Structures are given as structure tokens and as C-alpha cells.
Amino acid sequence: MLAALALVLATAACGADGTEAAGGGVMLTLWTRAATESVTKAYAEAYNAAHRDQVQVTAYPNEEYPAKLASAAGARALPDLFAADVVFAPQYSAQGLWADITDRFAALPHKDSIAPAHVRAGTSEGRNYALPHTIDVSVLLYNKDLYAKAGLDPERPPRTLREFAEHAQRVDRLGGEVHGTYLGGNCGGCVEFTLWPSVWAAGGEVLDAEGRTAKVDSPEMAEVFALYRGLYEQGVAAPASKDEAGPTWLGALQSGKVGIAPGPSVWLDPIESKGTKLGVAPIPGLAGGESTFVGGDAIGIGATSRKAERAWDFLAWTMSEQAQVEVIAKGKGVPARTDLAVNRYSAADPRLVTVNGLVAKGRTPYARNFNASFNDPQSPWLRTVRGALFGDAARSLAEGNSAITKSLRQG
Amino acid sequence: MSRLAGVLYATPTAVLVGVFFLVPLGLLGWMSLHRWPLLGKPVFNAPTNYTALADDELLGTAAWFTLKYTVIITVLLFAVAFGLALLVQHRRPGVGFYRTAFFLPTVLGFASASLLFLGLLSNEIGPLARLGLVAGDVSLTSGSPGSALGSAVLLVLWRFAGFNMLILLTGLQAIPVEVYEAARIDGASGWQLFRRITIPLMRPTIALVLTMMTTGSLLAFDQFFILTRGGPDNSTTSLVMVIYREAFVRLDLGSAAAISVVLLAVLLVVSAVQLRVLRRRST
């Protein structure tokens, strides 16, 4: 009933098709989620200033966005371009929500340097459907002032996950409102973004290559969970970690009372703007190594768009050196091209070189049913996470693995 | 001529019901028999969408929870609303203020009310935590299945008690004063008046209120979607949340339609039985 109603409403709402932009070009509609709105708008402004075609950005709240896209697709009224969380890209590609861009992509001169994890996510059955739009990698963010107070060297971040735990414990001993670390213990997306790199760094896997079998019951995963569980039980991880469902995650780190925590690299600026001096390091495995979750948004041409050619012109432009350096790098973002990891803006801040360099090494997990299996609050993954961190760990990981595999293979 | 006039009068409503209820209902039934992708051609696959429901563990949990929630809410909400209606039944100084105060939460949108409670009960920003009324780090909306359900029940009571009070109050005031007076002359006690006059004469109103409460609870969505997000560990996931998940997370519109059809059938049966039983006794 709900779906049928949504279809009817969406059909009614999306009838108009304004095509003419001032100056003779066409107006391209671009949808994005609120989390990446500022980057999308920066791209659009730079493009609009130099082109006759104009890109009009509409942003929707993160939680409502997938439903908004689904109802627009059902009504065959998708925008000309739309970006989406990169982990949803395999599902959208397989469902045909984005137009096929295989041939156009193959003709791009710098196609081999475009973030490989994102390109893979936007590929279904050998065909390309999406390009990277924004890149957000997970890193360790640590508070340099608290490090100095705790007698740790602010220029020497941890090299192993065990060392990370020791540092967190040291900072936690400062007492008062200060805590060693913080995690999103009630948020499936937060945990996969920040804990999976430690598994990958140790040579472990979370999923098989096709995204049809879960491997969360691996020893590597159990060890990583056990370490974070220990930190929570000792009170080193702030108690609010248990209920952190995502919305207050950034706020907790902005408070300046957390020693070290894995988090999104795009938070570097919002946290520092609150007066906290941050250090950045790659996320290590238990005994060393490093990896990252290459997140962010992928973008493609709406399958129902009648302006695919013009929309591609915008997409191809976003991958140009000019857009990547003068829009993304200038705004302290992570370039989507590995050959631009070192550029005139990152050169000014060595932390950005560390972040940019991770794009080539990192991974984006690939699964058609990723959202239903991992990110959704009703996903079997969230249940597994909570069991592994706060309940019967061994049983949760074993049962969770079969429940997630079942969910991955559904439909 | 008079027949034509009748048809003309009924046409606008018939068109509205047809376009906004019968056509979507037909589409829904049709969808539930197909594998229905967002784009592309639907493929007939009946009865797969229905047989798969038995296999869906989350759906089972949600069905059980929704049933439990419906019973709890119906009993508590009815008791509170009826209590309030009896309290403000008679004209006396200040009663207007209380009637308004009890009814006031109804004017607030349900989603806004849910967000309001989310803020109030939050252990990060909520006043309960700030005032130190709750010891330690207790999350009332996601800490345990019991507290999550409790917070949602509290919200629904607060939001809907006044509305149901108003309907019950109308029913109470429709009972002729003479009936009470005659009974009092015959020596009936207060309790006897309530049991022998108020309750029997209120039956049609009670039937209406109970039917609205049960259908409303079986269709619960906003409060859990916003307040508890169905957690912790899916303990407060309602049936409509499962429909939403099937349609917009799994993008399986056929399966979402099948669950909707089953839920619709259950609602029809429950409402029919409820109205029939309560109405029969009232005649």
C-alpha cells in the first residue's frame, strides 16, 4: 500500500520537465544526499560558471534519500544525474537506475587513475554505471593536545591496533570527562567504515568478491571486535558509544574530549574548526599493516534522463584535473584520481597526502544487497555488531555470519 | 430525475474513492503477484511473494511485536482516555482548561512529537540526563527492549489520549441526564450507574474508539522509525517498518505489496469482528 501510494504521489509530483537554462544551455537536475551536499554544490558552481549548460543541485536528508530515489525510479522520473552512497552503487547499477556509461568511461584519458574501489562499485556484469563523486576514507583521528597531556608523542600515531588501544588507555587515564576513544556501537555503517579496515590490514576478508558470502566469523574480525569490546568494558571508550546510532558521532569527536578514534577523513575540518588540533593516521591491523574503507558517493546518469549526452559532459568534467584540484583539493577534499593525490593544495598539509594516498590502497566492499545486509537499522549486521561488542560475541559472530549470508543472497 | 440527482451527488466521492483507494488497491494486489523491479518489466511470479513471507524471520518478529504493542496500547490508551473523559465530564470551574490541556498534544504532528520525545529522552541532550534524574548512562529509547517500547508507549499515550478522550466525552454527554436521575431515584449507587447505564449506553462509542486504536496500533510506524529505529536488536520493529524496508531498502516492491495485502486482510477481519461483537451487544 505504502509503495503503491508512493508511486502514485511520485508520478503526480514529477511531471514537469524544465529543460531550458538561461543563456541557451540546458538545465540538468542533480540529486544528492545532505552528507555530501557542499561538495556537489561546489562542483555545480564551478561547472555553471564556465559552461552554458547549468546544473541544479537538490539535496535530501540522508535517511530519506534511498526511499526518494526508489519512488522517483518507480515513477520513471529520476533526475538527470544522481549521486548515492558508494556502497549502494552495486544495487543501483544492477537495478538499472543509472544509464550504462561503459563506452564513454572507456574513452576517458585518465580512466585508469580513477579511484579503483569506486569504479568497481559502479560496475555490474562488466558494465560501468557510475563514477566517484566524493571520496571519504576512514582514518584514525587523534587529539594532539590530549596526546601531549598524556605524555604521548603527538607526532607519533599508533602503528598497530594494539598500540592504538594502549594510546587510548593512556589518554583515558587523564580522567574527568576525557575518554580514550569513541565508536558508533549502535550504527552498522559506522562500524563497517571504521573496523573493517583493521580486518583488511591483517589480510582478512569480510565478504567474498561477489558479495554473496559473509566472512564476519573470521578470526581477524573476532580479534578486532574483542579489542574494541575490551576498550568499552574498561570504560576507555566513552559509555555513549553503546547507543551511538550515527547522528551524534561527529559531535562527540568535536567535543575535544576523545583521545583517538577511527572516523571519516572529511571530519578533519569540522573537528578542527571547534579548536581541536588533530593528527591523522591510517587504520592499522592488530599487529600492523594499514588499510581504509573508501567511502563517499558515486554518481551516474539517471536511467530515465533524456539529456544523457549533456549529463555525461558534466560527469567527464568532474574527473578533469581542473575540477579535481581546483574544486576538490582546494576544498580540502580527497581527489577521486590517484594521480592527483599530491597536488598544490595537499602539499601544504602533509596529513592530506596521507589521506589521499590511502585511496589507491583502500577498499569499497561490493554487494548488491549491501544496504539491507549491513547499513539498514534492521540489518543482520547491526545485530551481529551489538552482540560482538556488548553481548555473546562468539555466538553473535557465528549466527550473524549465516544471517548476513542469507540476506546477501536474497532476491 | 431524483435518481440522476443522487448519482450526481455521489459522483465526486465515488471518483475520489476510486482514484485514491480502489485503483491503488488493485495495483497493490497486482504488484503482489509479480517480481516488480523499480525500472523495467514486472515478471509474474505468484505465489512466491506470499510463500516467502513464511520464511522471513524479521517479519515474524515484527508481527509478534506489533501484536504485543497493539494489546498494550489499546488497553492503556483506552483506560487513560476514558479516565480523562470521566474526569472532565461535568461542567465545573476550570474544566475547560483541563479539556484543552488534555487535547493539546493532538494538534502536534506525530513525526514532530516523536522527534520531541527523542530529544527529551536522549541521554546526550535530554533534560532527564541533565537534571541527573537518570543515574548513569541509560538510553531510554534504545537501551533495552523494555525501555524502548516503554518510551514509544509513553509518547503514544501523551499524543493520543486527548483525542480519544474527546470522542468518549461526546459519547458520555449524549447519554440523557433523565436516565441517571431516574436511576438515582430508584436508589442506584455511583458504581451501579456506571456499570448499568454509562457502559451499556457508551457501547457504540467504545466500539469506534477501540477499532481506531487497534487499527492505528497495527499500522504503527512513525514512533518506532524515529524514536527507536526498530531497535535494540529489532525488538521494536513494527510490521509497517518491514514493508518500508522491503520496498525502499531491499527494493523488492512485490514482496512489500504482498505483506501489505496480508496486513490489510488482518485489519479487515479485526475491525469487522470488533464492530460486530460490540455493536451486537449494544442493540
Image (cartoon, coloured by chain):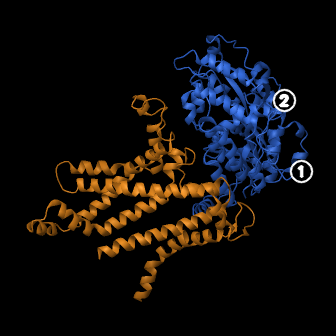
Chain colours: A blue, B orange
Given residues B180 and A3, the one toward you in this image is: B180
* Residue at 76% from the left image edge and 24% from the top image edge: A352
Residue B280, by quadrant, is bottom left
Horizontal and vertical percent position of residue A255 = 56, 24
Quarter where residue B270 is shown: bottom left
Q: Which chain contains the residue that carries disc 1?
A: A
Secondary structure at numbered mark 2: helix
Question: Mark 1 touching mark 2, by CB under 8 A?
Answer: no
Q: What amino acid is at disc 2?
A: Leu
Q: Which residue is mark 2?
A: A340
What amino acid does circle 1 point to? Asp
Position of residue B102 measured from the top left corner of the image (x, y, whole percent): 31, 50
Cα gap from disc 1 to disc 2, whole angstroms: 24 Å
Q: Is residue A216 shown left or right of residue B97? A: right
Q: How many marks?
A: 2
Q: Is residue A305 visible?
A: yes
In the image, A225 versus A337, the foreground residue is A225
Which residue has dot 1 on it?
Answer: A103
User: Counting other residues with Cα less than 10 Å from the Cα at mark 2, is it few (<14), some (14-19), or many (20 or more)?
Assistant: some
Residue found at x 55% / y 36%: A243
The one nearer the camera, B119 or A319, is B119
